[in-house]
Image: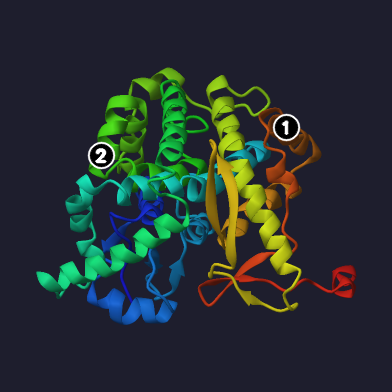
Amino acid sequence: MTDQVILYGGKLSLYSARVRSYLRHQRIAFTERAPGSERALKVIYPKIGRRIIPVVELPDGTLLQDGARIIDHFEASGQGRFSVYPDDPALDVVARLFDLFGNEGLMRPAMHYRWNLTEQTPYVRHIFRETLSLDKDGSELDADFDKLSGFLRKWTAMIGASDENAAAIEAAYLDFLDRLNTHFAVMPYVLGARPTIADYALFGPMFAHLGRDRLPLALMQERAPFVFDWTERMTAFEDIEDAVSLAWGGGMVDPENPPETLVSLLEYVAEEYASEYAAHHGFCEQWLAKQPNEAIKGNTVIGITQFELRGAMMPAPVKAYRHFLSQRMTDRFDAAPETAQGTVRTLFQGCGLAPFLDLRVSRRVGWQDHLEIWEPIEAASEKENV
C-alpha cells in the first residue's frame, strides 16, 4: 500500500517519458522510483511477470503496466485537469494516429542514435545505472550494463538500425525533425493549444532518446530549436505561455481545414510508415490464419517482415502491440458520427493515410495478466446474439 501514485520508470525509457509528462501536466501527485530499486526488483516485477517499465502502483496496491493503459486509467478516473483525447471525434482519430506512429514509427531512429553512436556510450552507461540493481557498484554494474546493452543492441540490429541502413534512417529522421520544427514554430502542441495523446506519444522517443541523449540533443537544439522548446513544455510541471503559445492563442486544430504544417506531418507518416504498417499487417494476417481460435500470448515476436525505407530494406519484428494501438484508432473511427468519419476519410485519403483506416487484423488485441494477447475470434452465433 502507498499513500500516493508510484511510477516505476526511468530517464532512459521513452515509454516512461510519456507517462511522467502526463502525470505532471495533470497535476497528479506521484513519486518516481528507480527501476532498479529493491521494491521494483523483489515485488513489482514478480507481480507483473516480467521486468518492464513503466509500471504505476496505485495507493490501493493496484499495478498498471503500459503507457496507454496507465493514461487511460487516469482519464477514466477523472483525476486530470483536461482530457488528452480531443473533443472533436475526427481530431481524436488524428491524435490516435500519432499515438501509433510515435510509439512504433520512431523506434528505429531512437534506437539508432542511442546505440550506434559510440561517442555517447559513456553517457548511456550512466543513465542505465538506475535500471540496474542499486545495491551493486563498480565492476558488477559494468557487467550488468554490458549484458543489458548487448540485448538492446541486438534488438536495434533486429529492427534494421545498422551501419548499412544508417544513412536512410538519419535522412528520414532529419526530414521529420525539420517538419516538426516548422509545425512547432506556429503551434505549441501537435493539435493546438493543449497537449493530446499525440504529444505524449511523440514525446517519448523525441525526448528520452532523441532529446536527452547528448548527440541527438545537440542536433535538435541546433537544427530544430522549436522542437526543443516543445520538449521543455512537455517536461514542465507548470503551464508555459511562451511566444508560440501566445501567438497561437486558444483552441484546437480544425480537422476540416488543417494547417499546412500538420498536413505535412501527416504526409510524412504516410510516406515513411505506411509501407511498414502494411507489411506488418500482411504478416500478421498470414500467421493468425494458421493459429487455433484461442487466446494467444501477444508480447512475443511472431516473425520478421520487411519493408523499404528510402531505398533500404528494413527488417521489422512483428508483435501484437502495434495492433493494440491501431485498433484504438480504428475503434474511435468506427464509433464516430458519419460526418466525422467523412472528415477523417477525406483528410487521410488526401495525405495517403487510407491504409491506416482500412487494414484491420482479423483478431483483436487484449490484455491478460499484464500481457498482450491475441483474443479468440467470436463465433458467428455469439455475434448474432450480441
Residue depicted at x 35% and y 59% = 153
Left or right of 105? Residue 46 is: left
Residue 314: give x, y in percent of width and height. Answer: 53, 48
User: Which tag is nearer the camera, tag 2 or tag 1?
Assistant: 2
Residue at the far left: name it: 138
- Judged left or right of residue 314, residue 328 is right
Q: What is the x, y in percent for residue 2?
A: 31, 73
- Is residue 13 shown above or below 270? below
The secondary element bearing badge 2 is classed as helix
Look at the picture and state if 152 lies above or below 3: above
User: For the view shown, which residue lies furthest in the top direction?
Assistant: 247
Question: On the rendered image, what quadrant is the C terminus found in?
Answer: bottom right
Q: Which residue does the image show at 35% across and 66% down from the upper left?
A: 151
Could you tell me which quadrant the N terminus lies in? bottom left
**How far across and how far down the image is residue 26, in percent?**
40, 48
Q: Quadrant of residue 309?
A: top right
Measuring from the top left, give residue 14's x and y in whole percent.
38, 52
Tell me the SS state at disc 1. helix
Indicate the quadrant where residue 298 lies. bottom right
Please give the label number shown on residue 319.
Answer: none
- The amino acid type of the residue labelled 1 equals Gln
Give the side of residue 187 with respect to residue 276, left or right: left
Name the residue carrying label 2: 215
Residue located 71% across and 43% down the image: 355
Q: Is residue 382 visible?
A: yes
Residue drawn at point x = 75 percent, y = 49 percent: 334
Mark before the other along the chain sequence, 2 or 1: 2
Residue reaching furthest to the front: 164
Q: Which residue is mark 1?
A: 349
Figure colour scheme: rainbow
